[in-house]
Amino acid sequence: MAEWGKGDPRWIVEERPDATNPNNWHWKEKNATQWSKDKLNELLVGLKVEDEQFIVEVKELKRCDGEASANNRKAKLVFLYEWHIEGKWEGQIRTGENRTKFEGAFEVPNLSDENEIHEVNITFSIEKSKGDKIKEMMKQRGEPIIREKLGEYVRLLKEEFSQGLILPTKNSSTASNSKIVSSSSVNSSNATTSKSSSNTQSSTNQTSFDTRELTVEDTFKCQRSELFQTFTDINMVRAFTQNSVSQYDCQQGGQFALFGDNITGNFLEIIPYDRIDMLWRFKSWPKEHFSHVSLIFQDDVEQTKLIVKQTGVPTQFYDNTMVSLIRNYFY
């Protein structure tokens, strides 16, 4: 047994006040499914939408299918959630003798960690054929209110539900062997550059916005050649993406499309067992804007270190990009 203060810090349990999960090293998952169902009901049921002519109230969630979890790995939090929601609403004309009542529904099919809140689809329907006006009111006024409540759910999941997932160390820090480093923001209209010519261009349609740089690194108990093969062999790529591969031509100039085409790009340079450079983008990023991603493979003591460096990440998408890198490349 290592002496106090020596050896691999992952196993020095004295660093934790309660000697549990030293240095927050181990994967810890907290199931948020039931909490999420309760919270979504709390936020949406009873919600009122009104204007000068109509008043509407959400009566119930007829469907709330999905799952959610908050995960801690090496003192980093990763939130996974995916929901399909259907709700019922009732409304009526505010004034006058004809207080006709209307019944309708709304649907949210894609509330998930892979979509920004503004990308979530919200649709409305109504049972009466003459209810077009109140349906239009729900589109104009109800949609932003419901979207705001969905955003509040995501915020509470990250801020409220995740409490206690990262435990304090002796010095009240969250030491971790997995490092994440970001640079200061820069303003750019062409935030990334290509190392070689390609059909996939790194541009932003002359739109100027802030970008950031991100570096994530971790170690794996395998040989460098084996880890390199994980990102170059199509069968292994299908395995770690759960077969979510539309295209993966791993050669210089080859293109790739992963996770329902939400991540696309092309390979710039491949140095066997050492490095993979590529242009890389999220579907939700500004049109035609690509970041530059480098996967760097290094020998370590009885293990291999993987360093992922990414430049040109739009600042507004920085957090989602960091979560995606951790989830898709490390866990």
Image (cartoon, rainbow, N blue to C red):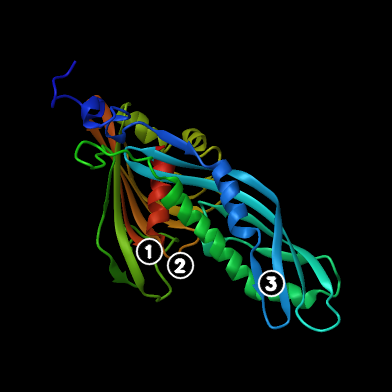
Residue drawn 70% across and 50% down? 63
Q: Secondary structure at mark 1?
A: strand
Residue drawn 59% across and 68% down? 145
Quarter of the figure with residue 227: top left
**Front residue of this view, candidates 70 and 113:** 70
The image shows residue 240 at horizontal and vertical percentages of: 48, 36
The image shows residue 18 at horizontal and vertical percentages of: 29, 29
Q: State if disc 3 and disc 1 touch (CB < 8 Å).
A: no
- For the N terminus, the quadrant is top left
Gap in Å between the C-alphas at discs 2 and 1? 8 Å
Gap in Å between the C-alphas at discs 3 and 2? 29 Å
Instruction: State the residue position of label 3.
Output: 138
Residue drawn 38% across and 63% down? 314
Marks 1 and 3: which is nearer the front? 3
Q: State if disc 1 and disc 2 touch (CB < 8 Å).
A: yes
Q: In this view of the protein, can residue 201 be seen by the observer? A: yes
Amino acid type of the residue that numbered disc 1 sits on in the rendered structure: Pro
- For the C terminus, the quadrant is top left
How packed mark 2 is, by other alpha carbons closer than 10 Å (few <14, some 14-19, many 20 or more), is some
Amino acid type of the residue that numbered disc 3 sits on in the rendered structure: Met
Q: Is residue 239 above or below residue 107?
A: above
Q: Is residue 114 above or below residue 146?
A: above
Amino acid type of the residue that numbered disc 2 sits on in the rendered structure: Pro
Quarter of the figure with residue 196: bottom left
Q: Which mark is residue 314?
A: 1
**Front residue of this view, candidates 121 and 92:** 92
